[in-house]
Image (cartoon, helix red, strand yellow):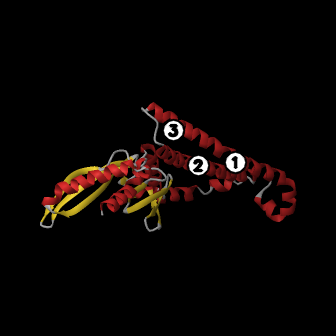
Amino acid sequence: MPTLGGVISDPIGWLQHTWPWLVILSLAAYLLWRFTRPVLHRVVWGALRVHGHAVGGALPDDELRKRADTIEQLLASLVRFAIILGIVFAILGFFDLWSAVAGLGLLGTALTVAGQPIVLDYLMGTLILLEGQYYTGDTIAAAGVEGLVEEVGLRRTVIRDMSGTVHSISNGQIRTSSNLTRIHAMAVVDLPGIPERHVEVVIGLMDRVGEELAADPAWAERLLETPHYLATTAFTDLGLTLRMAGRVRAADRWAVAAELRRRLA
């Protein structure tokens, strides 16, 4: 078995004798990665569809896609890490470096103590995924940041906020997360300053605009119910505040609310 000193003293000779093993190792790693990803994709989608039927109905396509992308991305990262770890172990064994690694036990202990926050990150990341708090593609508010989830890993969550800034948040810092796009949401519009004598007219206008939106083919698929007058939420010297709302697909809550405001203007 070659040693690291022998490789340094005669690199050409070492390469001539070991290049077949290097090619085999590289090819095995490539094939493992190349054919594992499609298998992961099929297994994850199949498992989620079966789970959706088992709990009483199939998940909406957009929700299924978010969950599948998150789980597939995580499993792919774990497979990539396992491949890299396998290559490292193979190199250590090939050069007989295990004795040198064993001598680093004290360093490993120090890293374990210093890495306690990292352990918390991984623990919280595992709980986030097991509980399904959010997935890639969801819009959430967590650790003081609100935006689109671009990556959910065991150690960190990556969020892009509304201004386009990307935030990498350690999962150990996430104590409360608010998912704004889980299956369905409410599109809410408030109209303030309505005189009392005009309340019934405005309520009729709200209901008519909601019905027109529901009848519009461009918007009908985004709605889960017809938007309508919901409540009077405030009384002030300037007038009453009337609220209209309707249940919509979660990702369309902002677009539907904006369209309602435009039609009410």
Q: Secondary structure at mark 2?
A: helix
Label 3 or label 1, whichever lies nearer to me, is 3
> Can residue 1 be seen in this snapshot?
no
What residue would you read off at disc 3? 48
Q: Secondary structure at mark 3?
A: helix
Instruction: Tell me the quarter of the picture where residue 141 sits.
Output: bottom left
Q: Is residue 65 above or below residue 4?
A: above
Q: Which mark is residue 65?
A: none
Q: Secondary structure at mark 1?
A: helix
Q: Residue at x 86, y 54 (%)?
A: 17
Circle 1: residue type: Arg
Residue 64 located left or right of residue 88: left
What residue would you read off at disc 1? 34
Mark 2 neighbour density, 10 Å: few (under 14) some (14–19) many (20 or more): some
Quarter of the image where the C terminus is located: bottom left
Mark 3 neighbour density, 10 Å: few (under 14) some (14–19) many (20 or more): some
In the rendering, at what x and y percent does residue 9 appear?
Answer: 82, 64
Mark 1 neighbour density, 10 Å: few (under 14) some (14–19) many (20 or more): few
Nearer-N-terminus badge (1/2): 1
Q: Are marks 3 and 1 in contact (CB under 8 Å)?
A: no
* Real-space Cα separation, disc 3 to disc 2, in angstroms: 19 Å
Q: Nearer the viewer, residue 90 or 34?
A: 34
Circle 2: residue type: Leu
* Real-space Cα separation, disc 3 to disc 1, in angstroms: 23 Å
